[in-house]
Image: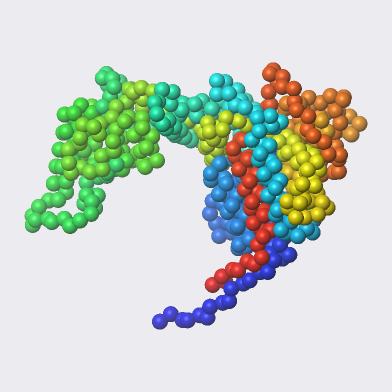
Amino acid sequence: MSRLVKKAPSLCTDLPLDNTDICNKLRLLWQLLRSCFGPTGRLKQVHNNIGGHVVTTSTSSVLLPAITSSQPFINLIKTSILNHVSRFSDCGLFAAILCLSLIEQAKQSGLRGNVTIGVNKHLLGLCTSYLQQEDCGCKVKLDFCSSHNLIRLAHSIISSKPACVLTEPEALHISRLAVQAFLLTVPCNSPGIVKLGNIVTVCVEGHPVLNSAVFPGLLVDMPDIFCLNKIENLHSNPLRTVLFSASLAGDLPELGDGIIEVHPGVDTDAQILDQLLELGKQVVKDEVKLFVCQKVIHPVLQQYLRSHGIIVIERLGITLMEPLTQLTGAQPVATLQSTIPAKAYGKVMDLSIRQFGSKTMLHLHPPGESAICTMILCHRNETMLSELKVVCQKIEHVLRLTLREPAALLGGGCTETHLAAYIRHKSVNEVTETVQALRCSQTEYLLAVEGFCRSLESVVTALEHDGGNSLIDLTHAHHWTRPADVMEEHMEESLGLCGCGLVQASPDKKWTYLNTKYPQFSPAPLTRDTTVEPSVLDSFTAKVNGLQVAVETANLALDVRYVIQDMN
Protein backbone atom coordinates (compact mmCIF):
# COMPACT_ATOMS: atom_id res chain seq x y z
CA MET A 1 0.00 0.00 0.00
CA SER A 2 1.44 3.38 -1.01
CA ARG A 3 2.25 5.91 1.65
CA LEU A 4 -0.32 8.67 1.98
CA VAL A 5 1.12 12.19 1.76
CA LYS A 6 -0.85 15.18 2.92
CA LYS A 7 -1.63 17.57 0.08
CA ALA A 8 0.24 20.85 0.23
CA PRO A 9 -1.89 24.01 0.13
CA SER A 10 -1.97 26.01 -3.09
CA LEU A 11 0.31 29.03 -3.29
CA CYS A 12 -1.63 32.28 -3.76
CA THR A 13 0.22 35.38 -4.98
CA ASP A 14 -1.67 38.65 -4.52
CA LEU A 15 -0.95 41.44 -7.07
CA PRO A 16 1.77 39.60 -9.00
CA LEU A 17 3.17 42.82 -10.50
CA ASP A 18 3.97 43.99 -6.95
CA ASN A 19 5.92 40.78 -6.30
CA THR A 20 9.69 41.41 -6.47
CA ASP A 21 10.54 37.89 -7.67
CA ILE A 22 8.03 38.02 -10.54
CA CYS A 23 9.14 41.51 -11.57
CA ASN A 24 12.80 40.44 -11.60
CA LYS A 25 11.94 37.48 -13.81
CA LEU A 26 9.94 39.70 -16.17
CA ARG A 27 12.86 42.11 -16.38
CA LEU A 28 15.28 39.25 -17.07
CA LEU A 29 13.04 37.87 -19.83
CA TRP A 30 12.78 41.36 -21.34
CA GLN A 31 16.56 41.77 -21.38
CA LEU A 32 17.03 38.26 -22.82
CA LEU A 33 14.62 38.83 -25.71
CA ARG A 34 15.89 42.36 -26.44
CA SER A 35 19.42 41.03 -26.79
CA CYS A 36 18.23 38.61 -29.54
CA PHE A 37 16.39 41.21 -31.61
CA GLY A 38 17.40 42.26 -35.09
CA PRO A 39 20.18 41.50 -37.58
CA THR A 40 22.95 42.04 -35.00
CA GLY A 41 21.09 40.26 -32.17
CA ARG A 42 23.14 38.04 -29.91
CA LEU A 43 22.70 34.28 -30.11
CA LYS A 44 21.51 32.23 -27.15
CA GLN A 45 22.60 28.73 -26.20
CA VAL A 46 19.98 26.91 -24.15
CA HIS A 47 20.85 23.64 -22.42
CA ASN A 48 18.99 21.67 -19.77
CA ASN A 49 21.00 20.85 -16.62
CA ILE A 50 20.13 17.16 -16.84
CA GLY A 51 21.39 16.91 -20.43
CA GLY A 52 19.80 16.90 -23.83
CA HIS A 53 20.18 18.87 -27.04
CA VAL A 54 21.94 22.26 -27.00
CA VAL A 55 19.84 24.91 -28.76
CA THR A 56 21.66 27.81 -30.43
CA THR A 57 19.25 30.41 -31.78
CA SER A 58 17.86 33.92 -31.67
CA THR A 59 14.49 32.94 -33.16
CA SER A 60 11.43 33.25 -30.91
CA SER A 61 9.80 30.04 -32.23
CA VAL A 62 12.88 28.06 -31.10
CA LEU A 63 14.00 30.11 -28.09
CA LEU A 64 10.72 30.47 -26.17
CA PRO A 65 9.82 26.74 -26.09
CA ALA A 66 13.38 26.02 -24.85
CA ILE A 67 12.98 28.40 -21.89
CA THR A 68 11.08 26.90 -18.97
CA SER A 69 9.71 28.76 -15.96
CA SER A 70 7.97 27.59 -12.81
CA GLN A 71 6.15 30.93 -12.60
CA PRO A 72 2.60 30.76 -14.09
CA PHE A 73 2.55 34.52 -14.69
CA ILE A 74 5.62 34.27 -16.94
CA ASN A 75 4.17 31.23 -18.72
CA LEU A 76 0.95 33.16 -19.41
CA ILE A 77 2.90 35.75 -21.41
CA LYS A 78 5.12 33.15 -23.08
CA THR A 79 2.15 31.02 -24.17
CA SER A 80 0.38 34.03 -25.65
CA ILE A 81 3.43 34.97 -27.74
CA LEU A 82 3.98 31.36 -28.87
CA ASN A 83 0.34 31.18 -29.97
CA HIS A 84 0.94 34.23 -32.16
CA VAL A 85 4.12 32.66 -33.59
CA SER A 86 2.36 29.36 -34.35
CA ARG A 87 -0.29 31.23 -36.37
CA PHE A 88 1.81 33.88 -38.10
CA SER A 89 5.45 32.65 -37.81
CA ASP A 90 6.98 36.16 -37.75
CA CYS A 91 7.24 39.10 -35.31
CA GLY A 92 7.38 36.94 -32.16
CA LEU A 93 10.25 38.91 -30.59
CA PHE A 94 8.54 42.19 -31.54
CA ALA A 95 5.33 41.14 -29.77
CA ALA A 96 7.17 39.86 -26.68
CA ILE A 97 9.40 42.93 -26.25
CA LEU A 98 6.48 45.32 -26.79
CA CYS A 99 4.28 43.40 -24.32
CA LEU A 100 6.93 43.41 -21.58
CA SER A 101 7.72 47.09 -22.24
CA LEU A 102 4.04 48.02 -21.88
CA ILE A 103 3.90 46.22 -18.52
CA GLU A 104 7.10 47.96 -17.36
CA GLN A 105 5.87 51.42 -18.47
CA ALA A 106 2.52 50.85 -16.73
CA LYS A 107 4.34 49.99 -13.46
CA GLN A 108 6.59 53.04 -13.71
CA SER A 109 3.73 55.44 -14.45
CA GLY A 110 1.89 54.62 -11.21
CA LEU A 111 -1.46 54.93 -13.00
CA ARG A 112 -4.48 52.91 -11.98
CA GLY A 113 -4.61 49.60 -13.84
CA ASN A 114 -8.05 50.25 -15.37
CA VAL A 115 -6.89 53.60 -16.77
CA THR A 116 -3.80 52.08 -18.44
CA ILE A 117 -5.84 49.19 -19.84
CA GLY A 118 -8.51 51.53 -21.24
CA VAL A 119 -5.97 53.86 -22.86
CA ASN A 120 -3.98 50.92 -24.30
CA LYS A 121 -7.14 49.54 -25.94
CA HIS A 122 -7.96 52.96 -27.38
CA LEU A 123 -4.45 53.48 -28.76
CA LEU A 124 -4.39 49.97 -30.23
CA GLY A 125 -7.57 50.87 -32.12
CA LEU A 126 -5.91 54.06 -33.42
CA CYS A 127 -2.86 52.08 -34.58
CA THR A 128 -4.78 49.32 -36.37
CA SER A 129 -7.21 51.71 -38.08
CA TYR A 130 -4.29 53.88 -39.27
CA LEU A 131 -2.36 50.85 -40.57
CA GLN A 132 -5.43 49.73 -42.53
CA GLN A 133 -5.75 53.08 -44.32
CA GLU A 134 -4.71 53.36 -47.96
CA ASP A 135 -2.61 56.47 -47.25
CA CYS A 136 -0.78 54.96 -44.25
CA GLY A 137 2.76 56.38 -44.24
CA CYS A 138 4.49 53.13 -43.23
CA LYS A 139 2.64 50.69 -45.50
CA VAL A 140 3.91 49.32 -48.81
CA LYS A 141 1.72 47.59 -51.39
CA LEU A 142 3.10 44.33 -52.78
CA ASP A 143 2.73 43.71 -56.50
CA PHE A 144 2.83 40.03 -57.44
CA CYS A 145 3.69 41.00 -61.01
CA SER A 146 7.20 41.66 -59.71
CA SER A 147 9.20 39.50 -57.32
CA HIS A 148 11.48 42.34 -56.09
CA ASN A 149 9.46 43.27 -52.99
CA LEU A 150 8.80 39.61 -52.18
CA ILE A 151 12.56 38.98 -52.27
CA ARG A 152 13.14 42.05 -50.06
CA LEU A 153 10.59 40.73 -47.57
CA ALA A 154 12.26 37.30 -47.54
CA HIS A 155 15.71 38.90 -47.27
CA SER A 156 14.57 41.02 -44.30
CA ILE A 157 13.48 37.88 -42.44
CA ILE A 158 16.71 36.02 -43.21
CA SER A 159 18.99 38.95 -42.32
CA SER A 160 17.29 39.27 -38.91
CA LYS A 161 18.41 35.73 -37.97
CA PRO A 162 22.17 35.88 -37.24
CA ALA A 163 22.29 32.18 -36.25
CA CYS A 164 22.00 31.36 -39.97
CA VAL A 165 25.53 32.84 -40.37
CA LEU A 166 25.10 33.88 -44.01
CA THR A 167 27.17 36.24 -46.12
CA GLU A 168 25.26 38.85 -48.14
CA PRO A 169 25.44 36.84 -51.42
CA GLU A 170 24.28 33.71 -49.53
CA ALA A 171 21.38 35.57 -47.89
CA LEU A 172 20.29 36.96 -51.26
CA HIS A 173 20.57 33.50 -52.86
CA ILE A 174 18.37 31.88 -50.19
CA SER A 175 15.87 34.78 -50.40
CA ARG A 176 15.46 34.23 -54.13
CA LEU A 177 15.13 30.47 -53.69
CA ALA A 178 12.50 30.90 -50.97
CA VAL A 179 10.41 33.19 -53.20
CA GLN A 180 10.89 30.87 -56.20
CA ALA A 181 9.76 27.87 -54.14
CA PHE A 182 6.73 29.77 -52.83
CA LEU A 183 5.66 30.84 -56.33
CA LEU A 184 5.93 27.22 -57.50
CA THR A 185 3.34 26.24 -54.85
CA VAL A 186 0.76 28.68 -56.25
CA PRO A 187 -1.30 26.97 -59.00
CA CYS A 188 -1.55 29.04 -62.20
CA ASN A 189 -4.58 27.55 -63.97
CA SER A 190 -6.63 26.07 -61.14
CA PRO A 191 -10.39 26.80 -61.49
CA GLY A 192 -12.55 27.31 -58.41
CA ILE A 193 -11.01 27.26 -54.95
CA VAL A 194 -7.23 27.50 -55.15
CA LYS A 195 -5.31 25.02 -53.02
CA LEU A 196 -1.67 25.87 -52.39
CA GLY A 197 0.91 23.15 -52.80
CA ASN A 198 3.80 22.13 -50.58
CA ILE A 199 7.49 22.90 -50.29
CA VAL A 200 9.45 19.81 -49.22
CA THR A 201 12.76 20.78 -47.59
CA VAL A 202 15.78 18.48 -47.80
CA CYS A 203 18.83 19.41 -45.69
CA VAL A 204 22.36 18.65 -46.84
CA GLU A 205 25.05 19.27 -44.24
CA GLY A 206 28.64 20.19 -45.03
CA HIS A 207 28.12 21.81 -48.43
CA PRO A 208 28.24 25.51 -49.45
CA VAL A 209 25.03 27.52 -49.04
CA LEU A 210 25.25 28.60 -52.68
CA ASN A 211 24.73 24.94 -53.68
CA SER A 212 21.16 25.19 -52.37
CA ALA A 213 18.55 24.85 -55.12
CA VAL A 214 14.83 24.49 -55.84
CA PHE A 215 13.34 21.81 -58.12
CA PRO A 216 9.75 21.44 -59.37
CA GLY A 217 8.44 18.04 -58.30
CA LEU A 218 9.61 15.82 -55.48
CA LEU A 219 13.04 14.50 -54.51
CA VAL A 220 13.12 11.36 -52.34
CA ASP A 221 16.03 9.44 -50.83
CA MET A 222 17.16 6.54 -53.01
CA PRO A 223 19.82 4.56 -51.15
CA ASP A 224 19.44 1.44 -53.32
CA ILE A 225 21.94 1.86 -56.16
CA PHE A 226 20.87 -1.34 -57.96
CA CYS A 227 17.57 0.03 -59.18
CA LEU A 228 19.08 3.29 -60.41
CA ASN A 229 20.43 1.62 -63.54
CA LYS A 230 16.87 0.67 -64.52
CA ILE A 231 15.74 4.28 -64.68
CA GLU A 232 17.57 4.75 -67.97
CA ASN A 233 15.55 1.86 -69.43
CA LEU A 234 12.18 3.48 -68.63
CA HIS A 235 10.88 4.90 -71.89
CA SER A 236 7.12 5.16 -71.37
CA ASN A 237 5.85 8.61 -70.43
CA PRO A 238 4.06 9.16 -68.16
CA LEU A 239 5.00 6.41 -65.71
CA ARG A 240 2.17 4.67 -63.86
CA THR A 241 2.58 4.92 -60.07
CA VAL A 242 1.06 3.11 -57.11
CA LEU A 243 1.28 4.35 -53.52
CA PHE A 244 0.75 2.18 -50.40
CA SER A 245 0.11 3.58 -46.92
CA ALA A 246 -0.18 0.03 -45.47
CA SER A 247 2.89 -1.94 -44.48
CA LEU A 248 3.94 -4.62 -46.95
CA ALA A 249 6.43 -6.27 -44.57
CA GLY A 250 4.29 -9.42 -44.30
CA ASP A 251 3.84 -9.27 -40.49
CA LEU A 252 0.59 -10.55 -38.98
CA PRO A 253 -0.06 -7.44 -36.83
CA GLU A 254 -0.03 -5.34 -40.02
CA LEU A 255 -3.07 -7.20 -41.41
CA GLY A 256 -5.40 -5.15 -39.24
CA ASP A 257 -7.61 -5.55 -36.19
CA GLY A 258 -9.77 -8.57 -35.49
CA ILE A 259 -9.44 -12.29 -34.84
CA ILE A 260 -7.18 -14.36 -37.11
CA GLU A 261 -8.02 -18.07 -37.35
CA VAL A 262 -5.07 -20.29 -38.24
CA HIS A 263 -5.63 -23.96 -39.13
CA PRO A 264 -3.15 -26.55 -37.81
CA GLY A 265 -0.17 -27.10 -40.08
CA VAL A 266 -0.74 -23.90 -42.09
CA ASP A 267 2.35 -21.79 -42.73
CA THR A 268 1.04 -18.23 -42.17
CA ASP A 269 4.25 -16.60 -43.37
CA ALA A 270 4.05 -18.48 -46.69
CA GLN A 271 0.38 -17.54 -47.11
CA ILE A 272 1.03 -13.86 -46.48
CA LEU A 273 3.98 -13.93 -48.86
CA ASP A 274 1.79 -15.56 -51.52
CA GLN A 275 -0.72 -12.75 -51.05
CA LEU A 276 2.05 -10.15 -51.42
CA LEU A 277 3.27 -11.82 -54.60
CA GLU A 278 -0.29 -11.85 -56.00
CA LEU A 279 -0.30 -8.12 -55.36
CA GLY A 280 3.01 -7.88 -57.21
CA LYS A 281 1.60 -9.81 -60.19
CA GLN A 282 -1.34 -7.41 -60.45
CA VAL A 283 1.03 -4.43 -60.37
CA VAL A 284 3.17 -5.94 -63.13
CA LYS A 285 0.07 -6.75 -65.19
CA ASP A 286 -1.17 -3.15 -64.81
CA GLU A 287 2.21 -1.88 -66.12
CA VAL A 288 3.18 0.05 -63.00
CA LYS A 289 6.68 1.54 -63.24
CA LEU A 290 6.98 3.20 -59.80
CA PHE A 291 5.99 1.35 -56.60
CA VAL A 292 6.06 3.46 -53.40
CA CYS A 293 5.29 2.37 -49.84
CA GLN A 294 5.07 4.57 -46.76
CA LYS A 295 6.37 1.70 -44.60
CA VAL A 296 8.43 -1.47 -45.14
CA ILE A 297 8.22 -3.79 -48.18
CA HIS A 298 9.02 -7.50 -47.87
CA PRO A 299 12.42 -8.30 -49.50
CA VAL A 300 10.93 -11.05 -51.67
CA LEU A 301 8.25 -8.69 -53.03
CA GLN A 302 10.94 -6.05 -53.65
CA GLN A 303 13.04 -8.55 -55.60
CA TYR A 304 10.02 -9.65 -57.64
CA LEU A 305 9.06 -6.10 -58.57
CA ARG A 306 12.62 -5.11 -59.48
CA SER A 307 13.04 -8.21 -61.62
CA HIS A 308 10.17 -6.85 -63.72
CA GLY A 309 11.82 -3.42 -64.13
CA ILE A 310 9.76 -1.60 -61.48
CA ILE A 311 11.40 1.15 -59.37
CA VAL A 312 10.70 0.43 -55.69
CA ILE A 313 10.75 3.04 -52.89
CA GLU A 314 10.05 1.95 -49.32
CA ARG A 315 10.00 3.77 -45.94
CA LEU A 316 8.81 6.97 -47.58
CA GLY A 317 7.44 8.27 -44.27
CA ILE A 318 4.17 9.99 -43.49
CA THR A 319 5.57 13.50 -44.13
CA LEU A 320 5.99 12.91 -47.86
CA MET A 321 2.70 11.06 -48.37
CA GLU A 322 0.56 14.16 -48.94
CA PRO A 323 3.00 15.89 -51.35
CA LEU A 324 3.42 12.66 -53.32
CA THR A 325 -0.36 12.17 -53.48
CA GLN A 326 -0.77 15.72 -54.83
CA LEU A 327 2.08 15.28 -57.32
CA THR A 328 1.02 11.94 -58.78
CA GLY A 329 -2.75 12.01 -58.29
CA ALA A 330 -2.51 8.50 -56.76
CA GLN A 331 -4.83 7.40 -53.97
CA PRO A 332 -2.91 5.69 -51.14
CA VAL A 333 -3.84 2.01 -50.86
CA ALA A 334 -4.43 1.10 -47.22
CA THR A 335 -4.82 -2.69 -47.53
CA LEU A 336 -3.26 -5.63 -49.37
CA GLN A 337 -6.31 -7.86 -49.04
CA SER A 338 -8.10 -6.65 -52.14
CA THR A 339 -7.20 -5.81 -55.73
CA ILE A 340 -5.96 -2.32 -56.51
CA PRO A 341 -8.72 -0.23 -58.13
CA ALA A 342 -7.79 1.53 -61.37
CA LYS A 343 -8.57 4.97 -59.90
CA ALA A 344 -5.89 4.43 -57.20
CA TYR A 345 -3.08 4.66 -59.75
CA GLY A 346 -1.25 7.92 -60.35
CA LYS A 347 1.51 8.96 -62.69
CA VAL A 348 4.79 10.85 -62.89
CA MET A 349 6.17 12.32 -66.10
CA ASP A 350 9.76 11.25 -65.65
CA LEU A 351 12.40 10.05 -63.18
CA SER A 352 16.00 11.24 -62.86
CA ILE A 353 18.88 10.94 -60.41
CA ARG A 354 20.33 13.89 -58.52
CA GLN A 355 23.40 13.76 -56.28
CA PHE A 356 23.91 16.11 -53.31
CA GLY A 357 27.04 15.18 -51.41
CA SER A 358 26.46 11.72 -49.97
CA LYS A 359 22.73 11.88 -50.75
CA THR A 360 21.50 10.10 -53.85
CA MET A 361 17.98 11.26 -54.63
CA LEU A 362 15.30 10.24 -57.09
CA HIS A 363 13.64 13.22 -58.76
CA LEU A 364 9.97 12.65 -59.51
CA HIS A 365 8.90 15.06 -62.26
CA PRO A 366 5.24 16.12 -62.22
CA PRO A 367 3.01 14.93 -65.10
CA GLY A 368 1.74 18.46 -65.73
CA GLU A 369 1.49 21.70 -63.80
CA SER A 370 2.10 20.83 -60.16
CA ALA A 371 2.20 22.92 -56.98
CA ILE A 372 4.79 20.63 -55.36
CA CYS A 373 8.47 21.54 -55.25
CA THR A 374 11.58 20.52 -53.31
CA MET A 375 14.08 22.91 -51.73
CA ILE A 376 17.58 21.55 -51.18
CA LEU A 377 19.16 23.52 -48.33
CA CYS A 378 22.92 23.30 -47.86
CA HIS A 379 25.02 24.71 -45.03
CA ARG A 380 28.32 24.21 -43.33
CA ASN A 381 27.16 22.57 -40.07
CA GLU A 382 24.07 21.17 -38.37
CA THR A 383 23.31 24.17 -36.11
CA MET A 384 23.33 26.69 -38.95
CA LEU A 385 21.38 24.33 -41.20
CA SER A 386 18.71 23.76 -38.54
CA GLU A 387 18.22 27.53 -38.07
CA LEU A 388 18.15 28.11 -41.83
CA LYS A 389 15.44 25.48 -42.27
CA VAL A 390 13.30 27.16 -39.58
CA VAL A 391 13.76 30.55 -41.26
CA CYS A 392 12.82 29.21 -44.72
CA GLN A 393 9.64 27.68 -43.30
CA LYS A 394 8.90 31.05 -41.67
CA ILE A 395 9.37 32.82 -45.02
CA GLU A 396 6.99 30.39 -46.74
CA HIS A 397 4.31 31.11 -44.12
CA VAL A 398 4.80 34.88 -44.31
CA LEU A 399 4.61 34.87 -48.11
CA ARG A 400 1.38 32.87 -47.93
CA LEU A 401 -0.03 35.57 -45.64
CA THR A 402 0.73 38.18 -48.31
CA LEU A 403 -1.71 36.44 -50.67
CA ARG A 404 -4.53 37.44 -48.30
CA GLU A 405 -3.17 40.93 -47.61
CA PRO A 406 -0.73 42.01 -50.36
CA ALA A 407 1.05 44.61 -48.25
CA ALA A 408 4.13 45.01 -46.07
CA LEU A 409 5.29 47.46 -43.42
CA LEU A 410 8.52 49.43 -43.40
CA GLY A 411 11.18 47.56 -41.44
CA GLY A 412 14.29 48.62 -39.56
CA GLY A 413 12.25 50.23 -36.77
CA CYS A 414 10.67 52.88 -39.04
CA THR A 415 7.09 51.61 -38.59
CA GLU A 416 7.39 51.76 -34.78
CA THR A 417 8.84 55.31 -34.68
CA HIS A 418 6.29 56.48 -37.26
CA LEU A 419 3.42 55.01 -35.21
CA ALA A 420 4.74 56.56 -31.98
CA ALA A 421 4.88 60.02 -33.59
CA TYR A 422 1.43 59.57 -35.15
CA ILE A 423 -0.13 58.46 -31.83
CA ARG A 424 1.45 61.36 -29.88
CA HIS A 425 0.16 63.91 -32.40
CA LYS A 426 -3.35 62.45 -32.72
CA SER A 427 -3.75 61.97 -28.96
CA VAL A 428 -2.87 65.60 -28.15
CA ASN A 429 -5.26 66.90 -30.81
CA GLU A 430 -8.18 64.73 -29.64
CA VAL A 431 -7.49 64.73 -25.92
CA THR A 432 -10.74 66.46 -24.82
CA GLU A 433 -13.15 64.05 -26.52
CA THR A 434 -11.08 60.98 -25.62
CA VAL A 435 -10.77 61.62 -21.87
CA GLN A 436 -14.55 62.01 -21.63
CA ALA A 437 -15.08 58.64 -23.31
CA LEU A 438 -12.39 56.91 -21.20
CA ARG A 439 -13.44 58.66 -17.95
CA CYS A 440 -9.98 59.71 -16.90
CA SER A 441 -8.15 63.01 -16.49
CA GLN A 442 -6.06 64.65 -19.21
CA THR A 443 -2.93 64.11 -17.14
CA GLU A 444 -3.63 60.39 -16.74
CA TYR A 445 -4.42 60.03 -20.44
CA LEU A 446 -1.30 61.81 -21.67
CA LEU A 447 0.85 59.88 -19.19
CA ALA A 448 -0.54 56.57 -20.50
CA VAL A 449 -0.05 57.72 -24.11
CA GLU A 450 3.59 58.54 -23.38
CA GLY A 451 4.08 55.08 -21.85
CA PHE A 452 2.56 53.43 -24.94
CA CYS A 453 4.75 55.42 -27.34
CA ARG A 454 7.90 54.81 -25.29
CA SER A 455 7.11 51.09 -25.41
CA LEU A 456 6.99 51.23 -29.21
CA GLU A 457 10.29 53.14 -29.22
CA SER A 458 11.89 50.64 -26.81
CA VAL A 459 11.36 47.94 -29.47
CA VAL A 460 13.33 50.14 -31.89
CA THR A 461 16.21 50.74 -29.47
CA ALA A 462 16.45 46.95 -29.01
CA LEU A 463 17.74 46.74 -32.60
CA GLU A 464 21.05 48.34 -31.54
CA HIS A 465 23.57 46.05 -29.80
CA ASP A 466 26.92 47.70 -30.50
CA GLY A 467 26.71 50.87 -28.40
CA GLY A 468 25.16 53.09 -31.08
CA ASN A 469 22.27 55.52 -30.57
CA SER A 470 18.77 55.37 -32.02
CA LEU A 471 17.27 58.57 -33.40
CA ILE A 472 14.05 59.76 -34.99
CA ASP A 473 13.85 62.45 -37.65
CA LEU A 474 11.31 65.21 -36.97
CA THR A 475 9.95 65.24 -40.53
CA HIS A 476 8.89 61.71 -41.51
CA ALA A 477 9.42 60.05 -38.09
CA HIS A 478 11.73 57.32 -39.45
CA HIS A 479 14.35 55.51 -37.41
CA TRP A 480 18.06 56.25 -37.75
CA THR A 481 21.17 54.84 -36.09
CA ARG A 482 24.29 56.77 -35.09
CA PRO A 483 27.22 54.35 -34.71
CA ALA A 484 29.10 54.43 -31.40
CA ASP A 485 32.36 55.59 -32.98
CA VAL A 486 30.85 58.67 -34.69
CA MET A 487 31.04 62.07 -32.98
CA GLU A 488 27.81 64.08 -32.74
CA GLU A 489 29.18 66.94 -34.89
CA HIS A 490 29.75 64.45 -37.73
CA MET A 491 26.40 62.74 -37.22
CA GLU A 492 24.74 64.01 -40.40
CA GLU A 493 27.42 62.54 -42.68
CA SER A 494 27.29 59.14 -40.95
CA LEU A 495 23.51 58.61 -40.94
CA GLY A 496 23.12 57.85 -44.67
CA LEU A 497 19.76 56.07 -45.00
CA CYS A 498 17.03 55.45 -42.42
CA GLY A 499 16.35 51.97 -41.01
CA CYS A 500 14.07 50.90 -43.88
CA GLY A 501 16.31 52.47 -46.53
CA LEU A 502 13.62 54.76 -47.96
CA VAL A 503 14.77 58.18 -46.68
CA GLN A 504 18.16 59.78 -47.33
CA ALA A 505 19.79 62.06 -44.74
CA SER A 506 19.89 65.74 -45.79
CA PRO A 507 21.00 69.05 -44.20
CA ASP A 508 17.41 70.30 -43.76
CA LYS A 509 16.42 67.35 -41.55
CA LYS A 510 16.41 67.48 -37.76
CA TRP A 511 16.84 64.48 -35.49
CA THR A 512 16.39 63.73 -31.83
CA TYR A 513 17.31 60.72 -29.70
CA LEU A 514 14.61 58.15 -28.98
CA ASN A 515 13.16 57.99 -25.46
CA THR A 516 13.75 61.72 -25.01
CA LYS A 517 11.16 64.51 -25.00
CA TYR A 518 10.52 66.04 -28.39
CA PRO A 519 7.69 68.26 -29.67
CA GLN A 520 4.77 66.30 -31.08
CA PHE A 521 4.34 66.54 -34.85
CA SER A 522 2.41 64.89 -37.65
CA PRO A 523 4.74 62.68 -39.75
CA ALA A 524 4.97 64.14 -43.25
CA PRO A 525 4.05 61.77 -46.08
CA LEU A 526 6.84 60.71 -48.39
CA THR A 527 6.82 61.82 -51.99
CA ARG A 528 7.18 58.36 -53.46
CA ASP A 529 10.04 58.13 -55.92
CA THR A 530 9.41 54.97 -57.90
CA THR A 531 13.15 54.46 -58.33
CA VAL A 532 13.67 54.27 -54.55
CA GLU A 533 12.33 51.20 -52.79
CA PRO A 534 12.61 50.22 -49.10
CA SER A 535 15.41 47.74 -48.47
CA VAL A 536 13.88 46.32 -45.26
CA LEU A 537 10.25 45.15 -45.02
CA ASP A 538 8.14 43.44 -42.35
CA SER A 539 5.12 41.20 -42.80
CA PHE A 540 2.00 43.38 -42.59
CA THR A 541 -0.34 40.67 -41.29
CA ALA A 542 2.17 39.25 -38.77
CA LYS A 543 3.14 42.66 -37.39
CA VAL A 544 -0.41 43.96 -37.03
CA ASN A 545 -1.41 40.78 -35.20
CA GLY A 546 1.79 40.95 -33.12
CA LEU A 547 0.84 44.48 -32.08
CA GLN A 548 -2.64 43.32 -31.06
CA VAL A 549 -1.28 40.31 -29.15
CA ALA A 550 1.31 42.45 -27.33
CA VAL A 551 -1.24 45.04 -26.16
CA GLU A 552 -3.93 42.51 -25.24
CA THR A 553 -1.47 40.28 -23.37
CA ALA A 554 -0.06 43.30 -21.48
CA ASN A 555 -3.61 44.35 -20.55
CA LEU A 556 -4.37 40.83 -19.37
CA ALA A 557 -1.22 40.80 -17.24
CA LEU A 558 -2.09 44.22 -15.74
CA ASP A 559 -5.56 42.93 -14.89
CA VAL A 560 -4.40 39.81 -13.00
CA ARG A 561 -5.24 40.14 -9.29
CA TYR A 562 -4.27 36.69 -7.97
CA VAL A 563 -2.06 33.85 -9.17
CA ILE A 564 -3.10 30.54 -7.58
CA GLN A 565 -0.55 27.75 -8.05
CA ASP A 566 -1.10 24.09 -7.16
CA MET A 567 2.07 22.95 -5.36
CA ASN A 568 1.34 19.18 -5.46
Q: Check the image and tell me how it is coloured.
A: rainbow
Q: Is residue 409 left or right of residue 144?
A: right
Residue at figure coordinates x 80%, y 41% from the top left: 429
Q: Which residue reaches farthest right?
A: 489
Q: Quadrant of the N terminus?
A: bottom left
The front one of 99 and 440 is 440
Q: Is residue 389 above or below residue 436?
A: above
Q: Viewer-proximal residue, 371 or 253?
A: 371
Vertical position of residue 187 compared to residue 388: above or below? above
Identified at 73% across, 34% down, the residue is: 414
Q: Position of residue 478 (x, y in %)?
A: 76, 33
| Residue 440 in sight here | yes
Quadrant the C terminus occupies: bottom right
Q: Residue at x 67, y 54 (%)?
A: 555
Say whether residue 486 is left or right of residue 144.
right
User: Residue drawn at (83%, 33%), measured in percent from left and top?
Assistant: 474
- Residue 503 position, x and y percent, is 76, 26
Q: Is residue 513 left or right of residue 261?
A: right
Residue 403's spot in the image, x, y percent? 53, 31
Depth check: 66 or 15 in front?
Answer: 15
